[in-house]
Each structure stands twice: as structure tokens, then as C-alpha cells.
Image (cartoon, rainbow, N blue to C red):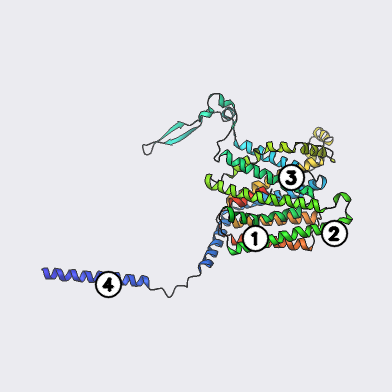
């Protein structure tokens, strides 16, 4: 019996050993029928394009129509109104910036302001009840959750919602954002054309890359560096050719419209400082979002609202622009609403026929509202799309704005400017493709886009 037991045990051990060996051999021998694996770089590139396509298809048609209307309709209309304002009132940069900040701040105040007593009367309740899961499985208990700030005297005092990012961080970002916004709009008073304004701001890629490498120790691929070099060459070429073309055509312009080298240099210097500060602000905002979360709605509100007192520095300039705007050509209100005029009662139509609004105030309102629409569209696109889609749409929007400025308003756009803008467009597309591996847009890119006023 013992021998039979030992013999059966040996057979079992041998069988198990053969099974393990066969399994190991079958898994270690490569399958000759399978395809040869592709290089890692090619596979990574294909995966990034698949991720981009999947993220793009996930956005519904309704969202694409809304985003396209807000970005292309808002931003391009903004350029149209900006051209008219700059041509009629060249030094209205502070006025334009102030109006845009008021518009965004008013909307943000509506979204972030809490007034307990008004909210209670509006909703018909005095407290907010929320279900809390009990320790007993399958049962819930309802508890009243009301913050101590909503009790007593504070119920009658409006206050802002609790911030998720410290106020000290916002103050630093606000100072930078205010500086960039003022410099960008103020440079238009120094004979910087709108096409050059659009092209020059694309140089933020180069500034952001250099500062990112120095301050944040970032690393970029060779294709990204090459794309940024192409953009930089295009910006420099367009800037120098714009001054040359404006100088050569100055003989046919009035004396007040001639471009002096000093004014042009001041305008370019302002845009350069704005690019540097914008890139620094983008890095600070990127670090802030990584630490506290990407609260872009909070950032949009506080970056505009906290900057309003800073416009006291331009108090006299803004008052002077108000006088200029009031003296502009009056336009009857009935002419603005001519589509609905036939449907208005005769008494209202008669009263509106005698009411006029200065022309520049109308275009300032259009510029402000379309600017807000453009910013909202950019933020909505940022939250729904990939980095490649965001960069592609924004570059296409800039190109559309450039065409409107050149073709409709007949701004000087010679062969050299065309070459420079083509290099900028090519470089930004190459940079977008080389950066297509990122899943979400960088906060720095979004901040730089907003800081440049998304014209």
C-alpha cells in the first residue's frame, strides 16, 4: 500500500511539473501570428489623437453650436466694435477696459453674492434642509443645515460666498491682470494697428516657454521648441514690417495719423511688457489652481471685481473719454430697433423717435457685451474640450478676427505682414499638435488668453 501510494504521489508531482513547464513555455514563446508592436512614440501619438477625437465627439452638437456662436460671434463682433472705437477715439483704452471690467464684475457679483433675508423671502423658506444618511442602514434623517452667518443681524447684510482660494493669491493675480489689460488697450493709442495687436500677442508662447523653463523647471519637446521659434520669427517679422509699411504710406495720411518711430516704439514696448506680465500671471494662476483647485468662475469674478478701485488712477482720462463719447454722432434709438419698430405701439414709437444715443456709447456697449460673451465661450470650451481642440479653435478665431480687421477696415497688410502672420499661424498649429498629448488645457494658457482680452 505504501509503495502504491508513493508511486501515485510521484506521478502526480511529475504531471504538475509538466503542466507548469508547458504553461511557462506557451507564455514565453512569442506569437508569430501577431503583428509587430509599433514604436512607442508612434503609439503614443496615435493614442493622443484617439483621445482628442473621443473628447471632441463627447461634446454635444448643442454645445458646439453655443460655443461657436459665443467665441466666433462674440470675439469677431468685439473686434468690429473695437476698430470703430479706436478709429474714432484712439485714446479710449482705459474707457474700454473699465466698461469690460464693470460688465464681468456685475455678472460675477450676481453669481457670488448671498443675501439671506432676500433669498428666504424669494424661496419662501427660512432654512435649508438636506438629507443626512443615518448610521442605521436603509434609513435617512433630515437635518437643518444653516450657517451661523445667516442668523441674527447678518441675515440682513449681503455678503460674498466663501472663497476656495485665499484673497492674497487673488490680489497678486488681480494686479497682474489689471496691468496686462490696461497695457493691451492703451497700446492702441500709440498707432498699433489691430492686426499687429492680434499677431503680437501670439508671442506669449515664447515668453511663457522661457519663463516656464526658468521658474517652473518645465521641459519641452524639440517639436514644441521649434514651433515656438517659428511663432517668434513671425511676430518679429510682422512687427518690423508693420512699422515699415506704415512709415512708407505716411505721406498719404493726415498729419495727425502719421506714425512716428517714438510712438510706435512705445506701443511695442507696452505690448512686450504685457506679454511678460501675462506669462507670469499664467504661471501663478496655474500654481494656484494646482494647489486649491481650478475655480475659474471664482477667478473670473475676483480678477475683475478687485481691480475696479485701480481705475481711480485713470480717473481724469476716463472723464475725458466720457466727454468725447457724449459728443459723438447721435443715433436715434428707433433706428437701432428698426426690426421691431413696426410692432411697437404708436405712442411708444413716437417717443423713441425723439430719443438719441451717442454713437460711441452704442459701440462701447457692443464691445463690452461681446467681450463677455467671448470670455464665457472660452471658459465653456476649456471645461469641455481637450487642449488641442481649445488651441485650434482659438487660433482659428484669431485668424477670423484678423481677416475682419484687414478686409473690412482696410488696415495696412502688405506682403511682409502676410508672411509674418502665416508663420505665426503655422507655429501655433504645430505647437497645438505637438502638445496634443495633454488631456486638459493648461491653466496658464487659459489665463494668458483671458489676459490678452481674447479679441
How far apart are the two marked residues, 1 and 2, measured between alpha carbons?
30 Å
Q: Position of residue 327 (x, y in %)?
A: 84, 38
Q: Point out which mark residue 248 bears.
A: 2
From the image, state whether disc 4 or disc 2 is nearer to you. 2
Residue name at image x 79 percent, y 37 percent: 322
Labels 4 and 1: the sequence-earlier one: 4
- Which residue is label 3 attached to? 367
- Please tell me how crowded label 2 is: few (under 14), some (14-19), or many (20+) other residues with Cα within 10 Å: few
- Which residue is label 1 attached to? 228
Disc 1 secondary structure class: helix
Labels 4 and 2: the sequence-earlier one: 4
How far apart are the two marked residues, 1 and 3, measured between alpha carbons?
31 Å
Pick the front one: 116 or 180: 180
How far apart are the two marked residues, 2 and 3, measured between alpha carbons?
32 Å
Rendered image quadrant of residue 25: bottom left
Residue name at image x 81 percent, y 54 percent: 261
- Please tell me how crowded label 4 is: few (under 14), some (14-19), or many (20+) other residues with Cα within 10 Å: few
Labels 1 and 3: the sequence-earlier one: 1
How far apart are the two marked residues, 4 and 1, measured between alpha carbons?
61 Å
Amino acid at each position: 500500500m505504501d509503495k502504491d501510494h508513493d508511486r501515485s504521489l510521484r506521478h502526480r508531482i511529475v504531471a504538475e511539473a509538466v503542466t507548469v513547464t508547458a504553461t511557462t513555455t506557451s507564455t514565453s514563446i512569442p506569437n508569430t501570428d501577431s503583428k509587430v508592436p509599433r514604436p512607442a512614440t508612434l503609439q503614443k501619438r496615435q493614442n493622443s489623437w484617439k483621445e482628442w477625437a473621443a473628447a471632441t465627439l463627447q461634446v454635444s452638437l448643442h454645445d458646439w453650436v453655443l460655443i461657436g456662436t459665443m467665441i466666433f460671434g462674440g470675439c469677431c463682433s468685439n473686434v468690429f466694435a473695437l476698430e470703430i472705437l479706436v478709429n474714432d477715439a484712439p485714446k479710449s483704452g482705459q474707457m474700454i477696459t473699465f466698461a469690460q471690467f464693470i460688465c464681468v464684475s456685475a455678472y460675477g457679483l450676481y453669481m457670488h453674492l448671498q443675501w439671506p433675508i432676500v433669498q428666504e423671502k424669494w424661496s419662501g423658506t427660512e432654512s435649508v434642509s438636506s438629507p443626512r444618511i443615518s448610521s442605521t442602514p436603509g434609513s435617512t434623517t433630515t437635518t437643518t443645515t444653516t450657517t451661523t452667518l445667516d442668523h441674527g443681524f447678518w441675515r440682513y447684510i449681503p455678503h460674498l460666498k466663501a472663497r476656495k482660494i485665499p484673497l492674497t493669491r487673488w490680489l497678486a493675480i488681480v494686479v497682474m491682470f489689471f496691468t496686462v489689460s490696461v497695457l493691451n488697450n492703451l497700446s492702441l493709442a500709440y498707432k498699433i494697428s489691430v492686426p499687429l495687436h492680434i499677431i503680437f500677442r501670439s508671442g506669449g508662447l515664447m515668453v511663457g516657454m522661457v519663463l516656464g523653463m526658468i521658474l517652473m523647471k518645465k521641459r519641452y519637446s524639440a517639436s514644441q521648441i521649434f514651433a515656438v521659434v517659428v511663432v517668434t520669427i513671425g511676430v518679429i517679422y510682422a512687427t518690423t514690417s508693420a512699422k515699415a509699411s506704415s512709415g512708407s504710406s505716411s505721406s498719404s495720411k493726415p498729419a495727425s495719423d502719421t506714425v512716428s518711430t517714438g510712438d510706435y516704439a512705445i506701443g511695442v514696448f507696452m505690448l512686450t511688457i504685457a506679454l511678460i506680465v501675462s506669462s507670469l500671471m499664467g504661471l501663478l494662476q496655474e500654481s494656484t489652481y494646482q494647489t486649491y483647485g481650478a475655480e475659474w468662475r471664482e477667478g473670473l469674478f475676483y480678477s475683475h471685481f478687485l481691480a475696479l478701485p485701480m481705475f481711480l488712477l485713470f480717473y481724469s482720462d476716463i472723464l475725458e473719454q466720457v466727454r468725447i463719447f457724449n459728443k459723438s454722432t447721435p443715433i436715434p434709438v428707433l433706428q437701432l430697433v428698426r426690426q421691431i419698430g413696426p410692432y411697437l405701439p404708436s405712442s411708444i414709437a413716437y417717443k423713441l423717435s425723439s430719443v438719441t444715443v451717442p454713437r460711441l456709447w452704442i459701440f462701447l456697449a457692443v464691445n463690452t457685451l461681446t467681450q463677455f460673451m467671448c470670455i464665457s465661450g472660452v471658459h465653456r470650451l476649456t471645461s469641455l474640450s481637450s487642449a488641442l481642440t481649445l488651441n485650434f479653435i482659438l487660433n482659428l478665431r484669431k485668424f477670423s478676427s484678423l481677416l475682419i480687421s484687414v478686409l473690412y477696415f482696410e488696415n495696412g497688410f502688405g506682403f511682409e505682414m502676410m508672411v509674418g502672420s502665416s508663420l505665426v499661424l503655422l507655429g501655433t498649429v504645430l505647437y497645438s499638435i505637438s502638445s496634443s498629448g495633454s488631456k486638459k488645457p493648461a491653466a496658464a494658457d487659459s489665463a494668458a488668453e483671458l489676459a490678452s482680452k481674447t479679441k
